[in-house]
Image (cartoon, grey):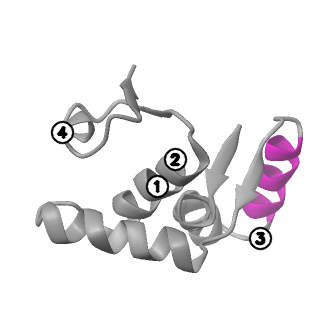
């Protein structure tokens, strides 16, 4: 499993608001999951920009997730039913 660095930053916001202990706990729990954080590369940024240019309602964070999946040939698992219109790499749970 892969989590884009942009999404990783987003999921760390609440633990950081809660306090350092919550961040540490989150990081410990994440270490138990076989996941790697994928950095935002120039290619990912270009693909995200192209997605946003085509879909004005698509936010940058979401475009970065979709672009990462497209460039890695991965599937995005989401509960957001709007995402399939942005990419064929999406599977709604």
Q: Are marks 2 and 1 in contact (CB under 8 Å)?
A: yes
**Residue depicted at x 82% and y 42%:** 29
Tell me which numbered mark, 4 or 1, is placed earlier along the sequence: 1
Q: What residue is at 68 percent from the left and 69 percent from the top?
A: 39
Residue 59 visible: no
What's the residue at 79%, 45% (across, down)?
A: 30
Label 1, residues with CA under 10 Å away: few <14, some 14-19, many ≥20? many
> Does the magenta segment cover residue 72?
no
| Element marked by disc 2 | helix
Q: Residue at x 54, y 67 (%)?
A: 6
Q: Is residue 30 above or below residue 43?
A: above
Q: Would residue 9 be visible to someone looking at this image? A: yes
> Which of label 2 and label 1 is nearer to you?
2
Residue 64, image quadrant: bottom left
Spatial CA span between label 3 and label 1: 26 Å
Is 62 positioned to the left or the right of 18 in the image?
Answer: left
In this view, the residue in front, 89 or 65, is 89
Labelled pair 2, 4 in contact (Cβ < 8 Å): no
In the rendered view, does 32 fall on the left or right side of 68? right
From which residue to which does the magenta span run? 21-31
* Residue 46 percent across, percent down from the top left: 42, 75
Residue, disc 3? 20
The disc at residue 69 is 2
Residue sitting nearer the eye, 77 or 49 = 49
Residue 20, picture quadrant = bottom right
Mark 4, residue position: 85
Q: Which mark is residue 65?
A: 1
């Amino acid at each position: 499993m892969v989590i884009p660095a942009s999404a990783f930053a987003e999921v760390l916001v609440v633990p950081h608001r809660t306090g350092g202990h919550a961040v540490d706990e989150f990081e410990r729990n994440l270490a138990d999951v076989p996941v790697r954080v994928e950095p935002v590369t120039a290619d990912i940024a270009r693909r995200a920009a192209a997605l946003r240019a085509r879909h004005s309602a698509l936010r940058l964070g979401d475009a970065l997730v979709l672009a990462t999946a497209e460039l890695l040939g991965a599937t995005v698992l989401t509960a957001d039913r709007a995402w399939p219109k942005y990419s064929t790499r999406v599977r709604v749970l």
